[in-house]
Image: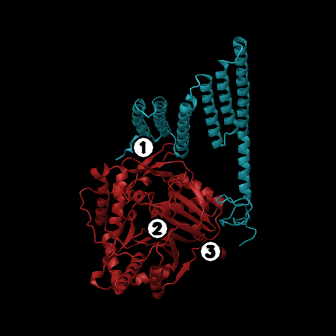
């Protein structure tokens, strides 16, 4: 991609909603941290960032407001590298002179990348961080050029910035039917700033063993626990005489469509499946929940069904009437639709980036990764990000309520299943003392 | 932790051996983050500012030079006109106008040179000197009181609008066609003020005719300029802006 020619691109299908719903609290900013074995050498990191800047020119864009749609436009602002002050997933200030939609944060032995979801999804964010890590260790002389995947050393391909949703959109496919509203946790919201994170480190081996016993994946196993905890809370609410109108629990599980459709895109390209429980049918055992989730995930990740969802999402934006609505009105409609329909579809989120792999030469330099999904909205209240590295799987519970009851029950269940759980210190100052 | 290791006490990152301060937070190597004393980096930034001031000192010198030259020229004009007037008419008659004008101009140049950074003093100084000039003009000519009853209200409205325009320019994030639009609106309002004060002075009541036409004519132009500025900002490709 020629840097001299300022390119621009319309937002991809998934990103279109974010400008309309992002706020200071609901920032739509995701974060991945690489915790290294040694302190970060700032000199080498700056060199690595310079290389990443050249490798991923399409991330150096700002959000611009058009008459009908927002769009991304290439800018030359320098990448923001700041000290990590512990404020997670902070919104990108529209008044900031630096208009980039991502930032790099550094502290002790941690390198963090925060991206606006407008730019990319978790997979794209992880790829960018991995590139920085590879360049960083290359600068430090710990990995030679021959050991680096050509993807990181080659020039950016135009396909990396394609809107893959549009590429795989199929005409004349029936839309999915909307579902009944989902149950939401009854906890009260925190005072501002609301967002708080609890990190739990779990043995991947232990978890894999437990999941294998049920013949399911780690994602299915964790989603099943999530639903089980929601079921417990739902029935407790009922027992306490609270009126619970919504009798469905649904978990939003993002899936990386790159595993289904061939594309090099580094932009958003994920959809989600919604495993659910119908509380009207009685109380489910854990095994029943696992079974339900497993089959629902199998079913909904079928390419034909995925194309149905893409058809609904992309079809909406292709509608001439929708397209011709000016952006101001469109943002209001999208905002209202998101809170009236979108957030009512699910009770929680489990986003699992799987087990991260880095080149063998630098594998021992990294301790673990942490994925913090964007802060949940006021209805969903809690979400969960999962990322594994070697035998360390870190669960990040993003929470905007004043209760840790959900996390307590979730992790308690894991402990009861003989899975080792270690709560990580999220307080910077206390973590520093450990170094 | 190796005590000889060079790292930032605030960010905890390892710094290269030749790094005296952390590029992330600016804290000097080994400096306590809670320390009240300014860091070396902060000192270096301060030093840069001093250098910047030194750089701008030549500009000040140039302004002082301009003021000195203005003084020489204006005082010369005053003396020349005064002498010519005295020689020809044996009294001070027409030279009073040029003297008053030159003194007002000198006062404004002096105010701009010495009170450049004191905005309140600058505005007040300029306003008072110009108001005095108008009153003097009235005194030298007909002495019917138009200076105070007509000149000063119009001048006051002019300065009030000027302040408003300056304030709006200052709070504008992006300056372009919006400045032109603001100036147009101010011109429209100023024409209303002029007609209002003139009608009050001559007819003892407010009466508006031509100024309303001027103001209404200016409004669509301003609206168009505002639209051009805020919706079609400089550098915005129409294809991008209107992509559907």
Q: Residues within 10 Å of mark 3 (few under 14, many from 20)?
A: few
Find residue A431 and name its label. Answer: 3
Left or right of residue A289: residue B176: right
CA distance for labels 3 and 1 = 48 Å
Left or right of residue A387: residue A434: right
**Residue A264 in view in this figure:** no
Find residue B103 and name its label. Answer: none
> Which is in the foreground here, disc 2 or disc 3?
2
Q: Please, what secondary structure does the residue beneath circle 2 have?
A: loop
CA distance for labels 1 and 2 = 32 Å
The residue beneath circle 1 is: B231
Nearer to us in this view, A366 or B106: B106
Instruction: Write the residue at 44% across / 62% down.
Output: A121
> Which is in the foreground here, disc 1 or disc 2?
1
CA distance for labels 2 and 3 = 23 Å
Determine the chain carrying the residue at label 1.
Answer: B
Q: Residues within 10 Å of mark 2 (few under 14, many from 20)?
A: many
Q: Please, what secondary structure does the residue beneath circle 1 have?
A: helix
The residue beneath circle 2 is: A375
Residue B88 image position (x, y, % from top left): 70, 11
Nearer to us in this view, A40 or B22: B22
Nearer to us in this view, A218 or B173: B173
Q: In the image, which lettered chain appears cyan? A: B
The answer to whether the residue labelled 2 contacts the one labelled 3, judged by CB atoms less than 8 Å apart, is no
Residue B233 image position (x, y, % from top left): 46, 42
Vertical arrangement, residue B40 with respect to residue A195, above or below: above
Q: Are marks 2 and 3 on the same chain?
A: yes
Left or right of residue A409: residue A293: left
Q: Please, what secondary structure does the residue beneath circle 3 have?
A: helix
């Amino acid at each position: 991609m020629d840097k001299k020619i300022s390119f621009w691109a319309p937002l991809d299908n998934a990103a279109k909603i974010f400008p309309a719903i992002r706020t200071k609290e609901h920032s739509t900013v995701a974060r991945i941290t690489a915790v290294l074995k040694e302190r970060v050498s700032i000199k080498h990191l700056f060199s690595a960032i310079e290389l990443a800047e050249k490798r991923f020119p399409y991330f150096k864009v700002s959000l611009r407001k058009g008459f009908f749609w927002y769009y991304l436009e290439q800018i030359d602002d320098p990448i923001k590298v700041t000290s990590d002050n512990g404020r997670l997933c902070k919104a990108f200030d529209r008044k900031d002179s630096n208009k980039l939609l991502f930032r790099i944060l550094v502290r002790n032995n941690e390198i963090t990348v925060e991206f606006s979801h407008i730019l990319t999804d978790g997979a794209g964010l992880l790829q960018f961080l991995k590139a920085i890590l590879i360049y960083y260790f290359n600068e430090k002389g710990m990995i030679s050029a021959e050991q680096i995947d050509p993807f990181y050393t080659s020039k950016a391909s135009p396909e990396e910035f394609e809107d893959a949703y549009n590429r795989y959109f199929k005409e004349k496919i029936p839309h999915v039917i909307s579902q009944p509203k989902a149950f939401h946790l009854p906890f009260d919201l925190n005072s501002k700033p609301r967002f708080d994170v609890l990190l739990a480190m779990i043995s991947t081996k232990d978890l894999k063993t437990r999941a294998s016993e049920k013949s399911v994946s780690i994602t299915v196993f964790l989603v099943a626990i999530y639903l089980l905890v929601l079921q417990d809370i739902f029935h407790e609410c009922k027992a306490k005489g609270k009126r619970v109108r919504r009798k469905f629990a649904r978990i939003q599980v993002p899936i990386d469509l790159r595993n289904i459709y061939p594309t090099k895109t580094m932009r958003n390209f994920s959809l989600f499946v919604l495993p659910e429980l119908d509380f009207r049918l009685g109380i489910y055992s854990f095994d029943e929940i696992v079974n339900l989730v497993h089959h629902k995930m199998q079913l909904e990740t079928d390419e034909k069904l995925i194309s149905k969802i893409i058809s609904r999402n992309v079809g909406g934006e292709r509608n001439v009437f929708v397209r011709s609505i000016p952006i101001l009105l469109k943002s209001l409609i999208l905002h209202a639709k998101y809170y009236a329909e979108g957030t009512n579809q699910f009770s929680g989120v489990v986003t699992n980036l799987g087990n991260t792999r880095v080149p063998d030469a630098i594998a021992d330099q990294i301790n673990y990764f942490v994925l913090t999904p964007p802060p949940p909205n006021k209805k969903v209240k809690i979400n969960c990000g999962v990322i594994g590295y070697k035998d360390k799987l870190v669960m990040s519970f993003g929470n905007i309520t004043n209760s840790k009851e959900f996390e307590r029950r979730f992790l308690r269940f894991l402990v009861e299943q003989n899975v080792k759980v270690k709560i990580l210190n999220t307080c910077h100052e206390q973590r520093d003392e450990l170094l | 932790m190796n005590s000889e290791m060079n790292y930032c006490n605030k960010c905890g990152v390892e710094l290269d051996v030749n790094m005296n301060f952390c590029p992330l937070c600016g804290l000097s190597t080994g400096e306590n983050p809670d320390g009240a004393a300014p860091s070396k980096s902060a000192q270096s930034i301060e030093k840069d500012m001093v250098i910047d001031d030194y750089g701008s000192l030549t500009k000040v010198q140039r302004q002082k030079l301009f003021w000195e030259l203005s003084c020489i020229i204006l005082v010369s004009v005053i003396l020349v006109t005064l002498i010519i007037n005295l020689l020809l008419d044996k009294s001070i008659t027409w030279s009073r106008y040029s003297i008053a004008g030159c003194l007002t101009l000198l006062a404004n140049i002096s105010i701009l040179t010495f009170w450049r950074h004191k905005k309140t003093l600058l505005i007040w100084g300029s306003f008072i000197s110009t108001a005095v000039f108008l009153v003097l003009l009235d005194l030298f000519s007909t002495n019917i009181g138009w200076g105070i009853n007509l000149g000063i209200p119009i001048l006051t409205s002019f300065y009030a609008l000027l302040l408003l325009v300056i304030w709006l320019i200052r709070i504008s994030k992006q300056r372009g066609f919006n400045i032109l639009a603001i100036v147009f609106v101010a011109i429209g309002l100023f024409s209303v003020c002029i007609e209002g004060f003139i009608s009050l002075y001559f007819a003892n009541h407010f009466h508006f005719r031509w100024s309303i036409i001027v103001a209404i004519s200016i409004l669509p132009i301003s609206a168009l300029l505002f639209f051009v500025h805020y919706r079609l900002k400089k550098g915005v490709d129409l294809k991008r802006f209107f992509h559907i």
